[in-house]
Amino acid sequence: MDVKEEAYEAGINTMEVTAVNIKEEERAWESVHHDKESRLIKDEDCEVASSDIKEEAEETSVNTEMHKHNIVDPVNLKLRSESLQSDPKSTKEISSVRTCEDPPPPTNQSGESYISKLKNFSKMDFKSKQEVINNRRPTPELKGLLQTKGQKANRSFQTEWYTRKDWLCGCPTRNRLYCFPCLLFSTCDNVWTNTGYCDMKNLPRSLCKHERSTTHIQSQIALKTFGTTRIDLALNEQRRLNISIHNAKVKENREILKDLINAACFLAKQELTFHGNDESTSSSNRGNYVELLHAFAEKDERLARHLETSTVFSGLSNRIQNDLIEAVGDVIRNDIKKEINAAPFVAVQVDETTDVTNKAQISVILRYVAKSEVACEVKEAFLGFDDVSDDRRAPAVAKYVLGMLEKYNCVEKLVAQTYDGASVMASELNEVQAKVKEKAPTAMFIHCYAHELNVVLLHSAKSIPECRTFFKTVEGLASFFSNSTTRTHLLNNVVKRRLPRAAPTKWCSNSRLLHTISLYQSDLRGVFRIMSENPDSWDNDTLMMAAGYDQWLSNASTCFLIMAYEGIFSDTDALFRVLQNKVMDNVYCCARIRDTIGVVERMRQEFDAFYERFEQKCTTLGLTDSGSKQSVRDKRKQMFFNILDNISVQMKARFDHFGELAFLNLVNCTKFNAMSLHFDETKLQSLSKYARFFDFVRLKADLVGLYSSQTVRNECKSPGQLLSFLVQKDLMQTVPEATKLLQLVLTVPATTVSVERSFSALKRLKTYSQNRTDPGQLSSLAIISIEAERLLKLKENKEDFYKKVTEIFVEKDRRMDFIYK
């Protein structure tokens, strides 16, 4: 017991002496840095009081462990003291502790000077910085870093903290802890980068707190990525320079491309050929496209330089021309698709024709209502031509039509389909419209009203023998002059007017021919007399035909038929002009058809006045009749009535489907006053085929509200005006179902006139000199020509238009840069 007590007292005395020495050393050093350290420690630990319970528990656990290790066993202490006294070298080895795998800093530098060097890291060159980082952090033993209580040391620094915190480093001279990444990269002063940390009591808490700081995280990232960042910066700078050079070249290329686009748009819009027979550099005429670009180059130095020096992409090849045409066409198609997607209803118009190369070309047009900020506009968009020569049967045509509808996402909102021309389309057996209706049940079939009127007049003329002979003679008279330049020259000298040609598919051309003959009847007879009086100047066929036409014109019956059909044609031509208007709504067309039928029926009652005018003209022209005047008059009266009855019956038969279109009268603005007094439910029921589009209860309420508005009755005279009124006054949401009905009525077509106009463009585009045109290019050329108004509207925003065309153009395989990086 005495030995143990003596050993214990000796150990205690040794620890007290050591603690006193350490305390005196710390006081000597802290006397210099006391104020600055207190301030930094205060800054670093300002939030200690707010730390959570978990951190307090951690601190308690660590302190408990440290306290356990500091309890000295008297026996062990005595043995240790004796061992230390007997072997100083062994004492040094035992007291040293293996701390960490990190190598120490260079041995030729003191700890304090090395920490100072780390603080000047930002001022070093790259090689020196790399050397410091390769040497890794200093992790010395800090024997003097103790926590004392009174004269006793109750906490000391354990080197295992270096292992636990890979950023922790120390200074053996100052006996302080530092943050290695923050010493190197941080620009903020704190206790871990300035004076060093020495508060062992709050060490675990302070370590955790510092690890969570933004400055420490950023410094760690900088340390871990050091070296690679320098290379990345260099690479990024080079890449930035390359991108800048590339984008400058792209900008120049796109400016050149704008000139190419302008040339393509101009030629396509004007329906001019692009290619020349000889486009070599030695040719004097290299084609419109190349010559137009060279004309542009006379005022544009950039384009001139490009055409002279470019070897990779001159923009003059046929492939480039075709790609530009298709790119512009696709921009127009995309604009059409955008409008169709916004439209609630769509109608399709289809027709086919034979081009100059004897190929069957099918044309498709979509009709819809496009809404703008100020009004709603009925539009008919041309989608292009396609060759269907391989298979013109109904299944193939129906498949093509449905394919176009699916391409523009409008099968579900197809409400009407109109066909003209090909017999397969109008046939009752295996008809295209029935096949389309299988996919789109609401697609009501409506035949072209203009075509129907043409058929009515044609059939009425053929059904009466005298009338059939009369029109054959009229057509022959026009051909008599047009087939000979000599006869035409004489006609020009005497009549001062040529006779228009009669087209069998357009009855209005017969009307113009008949009107010209009626107007110049006496002059035409003079031409024939000149031929008869100069037989040596004409061949026998000409003399015989001239004598026959002269006799025909001298007949009073000819004059009677000319005047009868001229009166009928004055009304049917007016109706034909209405039906030829592509934006005319169906309500107005139906009303005009009914009015024309009524005019033809009333002409029966006006026979006496008509016959009196006929007799006066016969007297003026010197025409006489043989036989009894009364019998001749009765015979002609019967002929007149037969002609009128035939036309009236034919029109009623051809336009007998108005019952299906009874709903059109729901928005007949001329009848709003009467409908405000009595709402016709049967007209509403005719909308049953479109039931999935409407709420009929709300629709009736909307219509009654419109009927009762005096403002609407005064300002709106047609469905188109009414819809524009609702748009301008922001009333579309007030009467939503009535708005949809108006859009439906305006979408249902009355004619295929737009399709027929596309065929006129086809004839101009694909002439014999242009029959090499690629099918895809032909369709795009036609779109640019027919949709010229849309093209001009797109070009109002020039930069956006050029950008859209360029984006489509560069999708092709290009050897020139057009895409920005």
Image: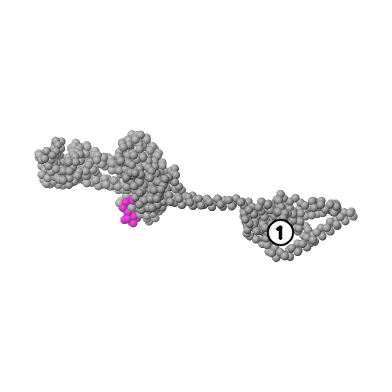
Q: Viewed as shown, does residue 30 lie left or right of 334?
A: right
Does the magenta run of residues contain 719?
A: yes
Taking the image as drawn, is residue 788 in sight?
no
Give the residue drawn at x 90%, y 55%: 2
For the residue pair 596 and 48, the one nearer the viewer reads as: 48
In front here: 20 or 587? 20
In which image quadrant can residue 783 be found?
A: top left
Q: Main secondary structure of the magenta part?
A: helix
Which residue was labeled with disc 1?
112
| Residue 154 drawn at (x, y percent) | 77, 57
Q: Does the magenta stretch include residue 708?
A: yes
Q: Residue 787 at x, y = what percent?
A: 35, 47
**For numbered disc 1, what is the local secondary structure?**
helix
User: Depth check: 182 or 348 in front?
Assistant: 182
Q: Which colour scheme is used?
A: one colour
The residue located at (17%, 45%) in the rendering is 492
Name which residue lies at 30% across and 41% down.
769
Q: Can residue 120 be seen in this view?
A: yes
Q: Which amino acid does label 1 sit on?
A: Glu
User: Which span is picked out in magenta?
Assistant: 706-720
* Residue projecting furthest to the front: 282
**Image-based side of 64 in relation to 336, left or right:** right
Is the residue 194 above or below the residue 395 in the image? below
Please tell me in which quadrant of the rendered image residue 731 appears: bottom left
Residue ID at (81%, 51%): 90
